[in-house]
Amino acid sequence: MTCDDARSRLDALLDGELSPSDAAAVQQHLGECSACARAFEELRAASHWLREGLVHYQAPDVLKASIQRALREQQTAARPRRTVVRWLMLAAAGVAIAVASSAITYAVARRGSRSASVAGEVLASHIRSLMPGHLIDVASNDTHNVKPWFDGRVNLSPAVPPLDSANFVLVGGRLDYVDSHAAAVVVYRRRQHVINVYSWPESGADEATRQTSSNGYHLVYWRRAGIEYWAASDLNPAELAQFVALYARAGP
């Protein structure tokens, strides 16, 4: 087994997703290759650190009851079936945004971040982007197509590093509006998981990465060289931390 083969399986090994024979082959390679063994230990340490920091909050019973009542009333309304189904889909998306972003905002606020409201906006934007037709304005897996597309549309040149060698595949970019800023959003995929990376100019000192999670969504924030970054995904925290480390290292 080569180093590339082993490293592409480290996340699956950590999550217990490999077959016994594949797991044994990777473990054998780790016993023979100190570089890959070190990469696996770093991944495992990041997973442990993020797992320890997770904060979960449930929606209040009053909110749950209000949502259920509204859905029952809508279901009994005399409307065509297609209209009702569409309304329920939009309502479910709205509820997911409201509940998840409220929990994210509260979790970040508890940690003393100045960016509590921004976290809620980023999460709401991420969830909206998963609806059909909202994810990308420019579709390309080529850095040289995506990066120039932002010229003249936002007042920064966002980092668009090629990370497909680590199985984080660039799929395109779009514009968004967060915290009264026009934001550049670079979009990657890891298997079926979407990773949105938001960036905009922000004055202030550099800040190390911080993360928070709620209802299956994870956010990582950092600031570097006058640019604020947010990465949002439902990818597991360890792999998202790996992505952020690679992206930040390759960025400006």
Image: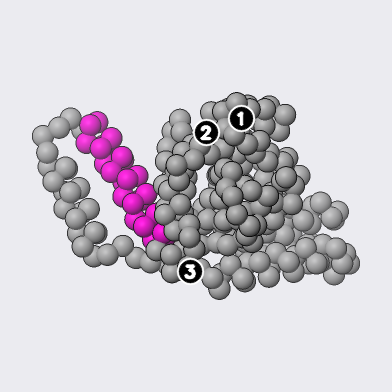
The residue wearing badge 1 is 150
Cα separation, mark 3 vs mark 1, equals 33 Å
Q: Amino acid at mark 1?
A: Phe
Q: Residue at x 66, y 66 (%)?
A: 46
Residue 221: horizontal and vertical position, in percent? 57, 56
Q: Residue at x 60, y 39 (%)?
A: 186
Q: Which residues are magenta?
A: 82-105
The residue wearing badge 3 is 111
Quarter holding residue 83: top left
Task: Indicate the quadrant containing the C terminus: top left, top right, bottom left or bottom right.
Answer: top right
Q: Which of 236/155 is in front?
A: 155
Q: Residue at x 42, y 37 (%)?
A: 131
74 left or right of 220 in image? left
Please say whether residue 16 is visible from this viewpoint: no
Rendered image coloring scheme: one colour
Q: Amino acid at mark 2?
A: Leu
The residue wearing badge 2 is 175
Quarter holding residue 80: top left
Residue 185: horizontal and vertical position, in percent? 56, 39
